[in-house]
Image (cartoon, grey):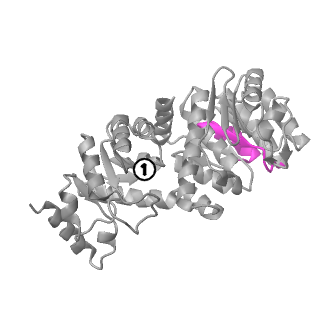
Amino acid sequence: MVDKIAEVMKRVRGSTPLVQCITNYVTVNDVANILICFGASPAMVEVRGEVEEFAAAISALYINLGTLTGEQKEAAIAAARRATELGKPVVLDPVACGAISRKMDVIDRLLECSRIAVIKGNTGEIKFLAGYSGKMRGMDSVDEGEDLPEACRTLAERLNTVVVATGKTDVVTDGRRTCLVNNGTPLFGAITGSGCMAGALVAAAAAVESDLFAASTAAMVAMGVAGEMAAELAGPNTPGTFRVRLFSREFYELAVRMKMLADRHRIPLIINDRLDIALAVDADGLHVGQEDLPVEIARRLLGPGKILGCSVSNEEEALQAERAGADYLGAGNVYPTGSKEVATPPIGVEGLRRIKDTVSIPVVGIGGIGLHNIEAVKETGVDGISVISAILGSRDIERAAWELRNAWRRQ
């Protein structure tokens, strides 16, 4: 399944599917932006007189019933009917179906006139549609998720569709196969639109993958992992910063510029932590830490032709990373450093030496290294050093870089 997820994500970025979204006005901008970040192209076409003609151009249709107007209702029904006739996947987000009876009238009409490829809802919505007791507060689920996998399978079998339920653990099923996705962050619940964004990603994945179970799983894993990474960058209890980090636009645009610069000088570009950004810009590699994606998963998603590094602080972690497919290791922190918060004490040059002697792949020393201690690091036999403050903390960055380079190469 991991290989399939990687394949789906690459195909989205390779084909840029056009996803038509008839969605609620609260999150329409978020939905458009998350699709762009995923590699798809959003089209917010929701006028009744336009949707049937536009259906010929789209790759998938996403319908969200959140703030459904009369115009949207008729447009959604017409768009779904025409998309089905043309063989385009339709993804339905039945927002607040358990709280507002009118929503069920629209859902019934959609089921009558079209083929719903995927139903994506929160825990309360899916349990309500399946005939279980689902707890809702307006558009939000307050359900703890008891019997959720069973409810999802029941609904999938009844409607012959794929069902995706979001919650503490996301559930994806086609009635025969079931996947539990444990990626994500509590910060999803602190912002508006996370469910809407997830539904849009499901539509984008369904546009490029006929196995709708695999497509939906890939989309939910991508959303969950992006959330985890954004949460790590944002810090705790920072929903506003988390929302900005989730879209990765600033980081992505920086990575694009760095890739162009690195290619011009024939220097490999390694992206730290962010697998999605590495894939998006076709970086030469990725570096992960102990708190990031496991090396074996990162290797499968990244592919065999890319460079994969891993941060380690002891021999056991080093051996595990090497066996899992890492191409090199960043070992440290060797010395105390102010560049990042570190919970463990420095490993020192002896710890660095033990890691180097344990593995057969290249080892790079990390943390607190500069001109004042570079000779001691060289004596451990490591293959290189990684620095931040020693260069960026200097008034003359170019000179600092040359001095470190020359000191490392000096016999």
Considering every residue shown, the one lying at the far front of the view is: 350
Q: Between residues 232 and 91, which one lies in front from this camera angle?
A: 232
Residue 42 lies, with reference to residue 320, above or below; the image says below
Q: Between residues 408 and 221, which one lies in front from this camera angle?
A: 408
Q: Between residues 95 and 78, which one lies in front from this camera angle?
A: 95
Residue 60 painted magenta? yes
Residue 356 picture location, percent across and down: 25, 47
Q: Amino acid at mark 1?
A: Gly
Q: Which residue is mark 1?
A: 289
Asked if residue 93 lies left or right of residue 257, the reply is: right
Residue 151 picture location, percent across and down: 77, 28
Residue 135 lies, with reference to residue 348, above or below; the image says above
Considering every residue shown, the one lying at the far left of the view is: 411
Residue depicted at x 55% and y 49%: 226
Asked if residue 393 lies left or right of residue 230, the reply is: left
Residue depicted at x 74% and y 29%: 152
Residue 172 lies, with reference to residue 259, above or below; the image says above
Residue 341 painted magenta? no
Asked if residue 347 lies left or right of residue 237, the reply is: left
Which region is colored magenta? 46-69
Residue 247 visible: no
Look at the numbered disc 1 and give the secondary structure of its residue: loop
